[in-house]
Image (cartoon, rainbow, N blue to C red):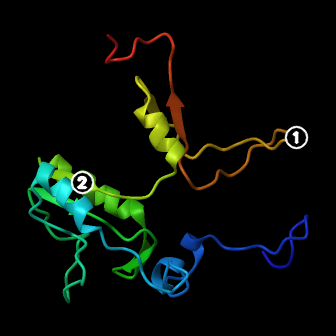
């Protein structure tokens, strides 16, 4: 798409659509150009005391030839993956690749603690007693103008259910 849209705005690409060299997660995510990625020691110590980590698939600095997406993880892994896209084996990969790997390792009987930013409202819904979350897939929403079906957003839609018919699991 080139030129302004119907409202006169120039189109802008989302960070995950930019080449890694231009993605803010690679060029620096602070106003000072620094890369604020490392876990604060206090936070890590708190989690480590509970989960006794023996592996980090996203170490810093990254040892030459190390690949956290393809290597075997430890019995208890702390995962602070890149928040943006990376080029891995010639393909652009983002958080979904790390989640897939975390699930794969968990299915082997391992503990995985993965940290990743999400909107506060998601955490509020998940913390609500009795919340059920369903994956609706890539919904093909209807146009407001004529109810024609769109192509989808390319992102899966979560359905959060706080059902009054269900008694909360920890009700007293």
What residue is disc 2 on? 113
In the picture, measured across the screen, residue 108 lies left or right of residue 138, that is left
The residue tagged with tag 2: helix, strand or loop?
strand
Q: Which residue is mark 1?
A: 146
The Cα–Cα distance between marks 2 and 1, rounded to whole angstroms, is: 45 Å
Give the crowd class for mark 2: few <14, some 14-19, many >=20 residues within 10 Å. some
The spot of residue 60 in percent (x, y) is 25, 80
Q: Quadrant of the C terminus?
A: top left
Q: Does residue 121 appear left or right of residue 133 in this picture?
A: right
In this picture, residue 63 sits left or right of residue 9? left
Residue 110 shows in this picture: no
Q: Is residue 75 above or below residue 169?
A: below
**Disc nearest the viewer among 2 and 1:** 2
Q: Residue at x 81, y 75 (%)?
A: 10
Residue 115 located left or right of residue 136: left
The residue depicted at 51 percent of the width and 79 percent of the height is 30
């Amino acid at each position: 798409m080139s030129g302004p849209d119907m409202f006169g705005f120039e189109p802008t690409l989302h960070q995950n659509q930019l080449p890694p060299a231009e993605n803010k997660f690679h060029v620096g995510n602070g106003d000072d150009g620094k890369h604020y990625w490392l876990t604060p020691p206090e936070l890590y110590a708190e989690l480590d005391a509970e989960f006794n980590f023996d592996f980090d698939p996203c170490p810093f600095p990254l040892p030459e030839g190390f690949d956290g997406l393809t290597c075997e993880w430890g019995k208890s892994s702390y995962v602070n993956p890149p928040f943006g896209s990376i080029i891995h084996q010639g393909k652009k990969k983002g958080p979904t690749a790390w989640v897939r790997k975390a699930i794969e390792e968990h299915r082997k009987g391992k503990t995985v603690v993965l940290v990743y930013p999400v909107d506060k409202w998601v955490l509020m819904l998940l913390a609500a007693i009795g919340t059920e979350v369903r994956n609706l897939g890539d919904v093909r929403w209807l146009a407001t103008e004529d109810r024609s079906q769109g192509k989808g957003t390319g992102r899966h839609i979560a359905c959060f259910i706080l059902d009054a018919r269900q008694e909360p699991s920890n009700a007293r």
